[in-house]
């Protein structure tokens, strides 16, 4: 199936490139290059790209880019097989890639003379000029090779140097492009240099993403990494630090304080991943030590890492004798979301981990956490003060935040502001929302399965996670808790969780989801009329769920059970009916309205003005080469009806604004 999917991707890609090339009057390889650059720029892999093709003896280059901090110069080249139709038919060999990278380095050496041979207004002159300017501040050079072919194993050369500047190689063959487009990308990687290099024992594997290296880290270094990067170091970890209160963590701390030299013997160490590693090797190519790790993440051992930091900062302990075992797996970024959960699941023995933990870093949960932490719930008669609902995106976050308050008085303040009864997890949120949306049979299948189904729905129709969304979701929690209390009063017993989910779902369907969630949020409780309606409905639901001769738990998991409950005769009481909204509660789908507006603004400026801006920038030598070219690209796309990406629209408007601020006017040209 993977090969079929790749084949379909290649076919679609080549058709798109050919169509785009015909519309824009450009060569197919150049159009392919531009398409790949747009994709990678959208993902944040590269920035400030400038496409310009030049070929002469021993030189082939398709463009360059410069990082936002101007510390990295990128050069691009392309190997495009016009006859390619079946992945693997003609592979990109190690010899092919080596030749392509050599031609890029040859361009760097000849850049000055090439520039002198081309007029200032030409794309090649701008290419050379931009590269020479970037070289003055570059601390790193990356050579990118793009191809619509599949590369052979070991096609990448070793890192090199150019005039003392480190040179690395990036190969984006069609297989990697396919993986990238279907798996997304991650945030800026953490890079760690080891000086002197860290001795290691490496067990390479013929299977990709399974190369494992063993090493022993200085405890102080691991603590310092956590000090510098905090939870970013644990982004792919399945849980937050679970605090000193557990037996495991008390043991870690005790060992660090009383027997630091024995820490390596007593502790299981950490399991980490990295996307890249620079090794010291012997003449036979055996890995002896680690010079650098890129994209390092602690995927198991977050407790060990955070406890080391705790002991270093809070206890002021000397960690010079502490050593920590590290098992490192090299995993390509596009495989992290696939491989990391399995590494963590199989290697984790200190605390139980559930599959729910693995989605902690999904955009929905990150956004919900960020927004919900800014909300103050209105004061109630019981508390007399505003409080917060604490969304625990990763297990242990509540305890971690509470632990930051060292004094007893500060801890009391934290608990008063964040009552434990107002703490809820991802699984809880999925339970509340799926009950509201009429999926009690999914809720009845257990936290993990319900959560997985919930995430499927979220991905299918992503909501705008703003203050209103979070307040209404919390109102669903208040409603669920009220229904649960009624189910308890009706002695639902061991089936109370099932009865609660079904009763809430039936209530929401009967009211067409017109229950005033905003009022529940403001009152921080449900109305007496709502409680009375639930009290009337609950026993009817129980009769449909708790059926003689049926296994209640299994029965409740079926959609047939929900059909039976949905069909029971029950009318909304008049007292509740008078409180209902005129229309059902609706949640806005995330359609990226801001991006649409920026694209509309770009179109409103018009192709003619964008073209004029590009000509003005070339004549006046204002703006960067990539900015001048972007204006021309936008003009072409508008004339031909081509696609303009969200990133291009944003950058183009910035270029337009900058040009106007330094004197551009459409009437000038």
Image (cartoon, rainbow, N blue to C red):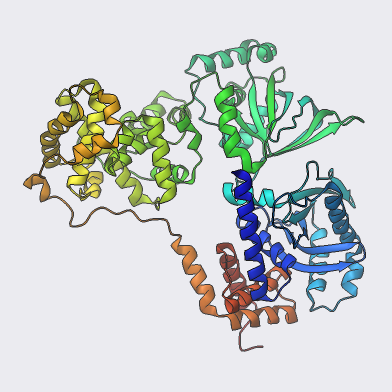
The answer to whether 543 is drawn above or below residue 642 in the figure is: above
Residue at figure coordinates x 37%, y 35% from the top left: 450
Name the residue located 8 percent from the left edge and 44 percent from the top edge: 573
* Residue 214 image point, x, y percent: 73, 24
Please say whether residue 418 is visible from this viewpoint. Answer: no
Q: Is residue 334 above or below residue 17?
A: above
Q: Quadrant of residue 276?
A: top right
Between residues 82 and 125, which one lies in front from this camera angle? Answer: 82
Residue 409 falls left or right of residue 358:
left
Q: Residue furthest left?
A: 574
| Place of residue 482 in the rendered image (x, y in percent of width and height, measured from the top left) | 21, 34
Q: Position of residue 217 (x, y in %)?
A: 72, 24
165 over 203 or under it: above or below: below
Task: Using the image, determine if residue 208 lies above or below residue 164.
Answer: above
Of residue 562 and residue 301, the one placed in the foreground of this image is 562
Out of 241 and 95, give the one closest to the viewer.
95
């Amino acid at each position: 199936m993977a090969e079929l999917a790749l084949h379909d991707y290649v076919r679609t890609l080549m058709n798109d490139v050919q169509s785009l090339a015909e519309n824009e009057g450009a060569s197919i390889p150049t159009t392919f290059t531009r398409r790949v650059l747009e994709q990678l720029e959208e993902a944040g892999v590269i920035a400030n790209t400038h496409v310009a093709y030049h070929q002469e003896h021993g030189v082939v280059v398709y463009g360059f880019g410069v990082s936002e901090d101007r510390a990295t110069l990128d050069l691009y080249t392309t190997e495009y097989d016009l006859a390619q139709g079946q992945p693997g038919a003609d592979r990109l060999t190690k010899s092919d890639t080596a030749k392509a990278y050599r031609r890029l380095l040859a361009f760097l050496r000849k850049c000055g003379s090439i520039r002198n041979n081309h007029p200032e207004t030409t794309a090649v002159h701008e290419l050379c000029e931009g590269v020479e300017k970037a070289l003055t501040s570059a601390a790193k050079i990356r050579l990118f090779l793009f191809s619509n072919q599949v590369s052979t194993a070991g096609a990448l050369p070793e890192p090199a140097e150019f005039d003392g500047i480190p040179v690395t190689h990036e190969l984006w063959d069609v297989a990697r492009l396919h993986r990238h487009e279907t798996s997304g990308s991650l945030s800026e990687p953490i890079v760690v240099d080891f000086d002197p290099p860290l001795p290691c024992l490496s067990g390479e594997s013929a299977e990709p993403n399974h190369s494992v290296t063993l090493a022993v880290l200085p405890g102080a270094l691991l603590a310092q990494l956590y000090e510098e990067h905090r939870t970013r170091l644990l982004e792919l970890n399945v849980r937050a630090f679970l605090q000193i209160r557990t037996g495991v963590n008390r043991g870690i701390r005790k060992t660090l304080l009383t027997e630091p030299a024995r820490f390596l013997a007593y502790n299981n160490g950490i399991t980490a991943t990295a996307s890249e590693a620079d090794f010291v090797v012997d003449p036979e190519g055996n890995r002896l030590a680690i010079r650098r790790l890129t994209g390092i993440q602690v995927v198991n051992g977050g407790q060990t890492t955070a406890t080391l930091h705790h002991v270093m900062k809070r206890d002021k302990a000397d960690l010079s004798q502490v050593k920590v075992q590290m098992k490192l797996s090299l995993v390509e970024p596009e495989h992290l979301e696939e491989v990391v959960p399995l590494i963590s699941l199989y290697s984790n023995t200190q605390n139980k981990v559930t599959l729910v933990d693995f989605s902690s870093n999904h955009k929905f949960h990150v956004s919900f956490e960020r927004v919900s932490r800014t909300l103050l719930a209105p004061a109630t008669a019981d508390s007399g003060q505003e409080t917060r609902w604490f969304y625990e995106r990763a297990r242990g976050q509540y305890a971690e935040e509470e632990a930051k308050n060292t004094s007893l008085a500060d801890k009391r303040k934290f608990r008063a502001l964040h009552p434990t009864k107002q703490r809820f997890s991802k699984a809880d949120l999925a339970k509340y929302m799926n009950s509201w949306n009429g999926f009690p049979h999914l809720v009845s299948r257990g936290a993990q399965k319900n959560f997985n189904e919930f995430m499927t729905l979220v991905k299918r129709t992503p909501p705008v996670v703003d203050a209103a969304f979070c307040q209404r979701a919390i109102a669903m929690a208040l409603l669920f808790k009220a229904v649960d209390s009624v189910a308890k009063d009706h002695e639902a017993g061991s089936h109370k969780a099932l009865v609660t989910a079904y009763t809430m779902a039936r209530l929401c369907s009967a009211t067409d989801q017109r229950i005033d969630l905003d009022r529940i949020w403001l009152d921080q409780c449900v109305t007496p009329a709502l409680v009375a309606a639930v009290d009337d409905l609950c026993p009817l639901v129980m009769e449909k769920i708790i059926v003689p001769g049926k296994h209640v738990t299994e029965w409740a998991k079926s959609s047939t059970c929900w059909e039976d409950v949905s069909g029971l005769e029950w009318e909304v009481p008049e007292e509740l009916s008078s409180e209902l909204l005129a229309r059902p509660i609706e949640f806005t789908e995330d359609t990226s309205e801001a991006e649409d507006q920026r694209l509309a603004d770009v179109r409103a400026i018009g192709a003619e003005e964008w073209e004029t801006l590009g000509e003005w920038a070339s004549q006046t030598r204002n703006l960067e080469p990539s900015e001048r070219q972007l204006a021309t690209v936008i003009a072409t796309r508008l004339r031909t009806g081509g696609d303009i990406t969200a990133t291009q629209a944003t950058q183009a408007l910035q270029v337009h604004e900058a040009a106007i601020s330094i004197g551009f006017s459409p009437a000038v040209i």
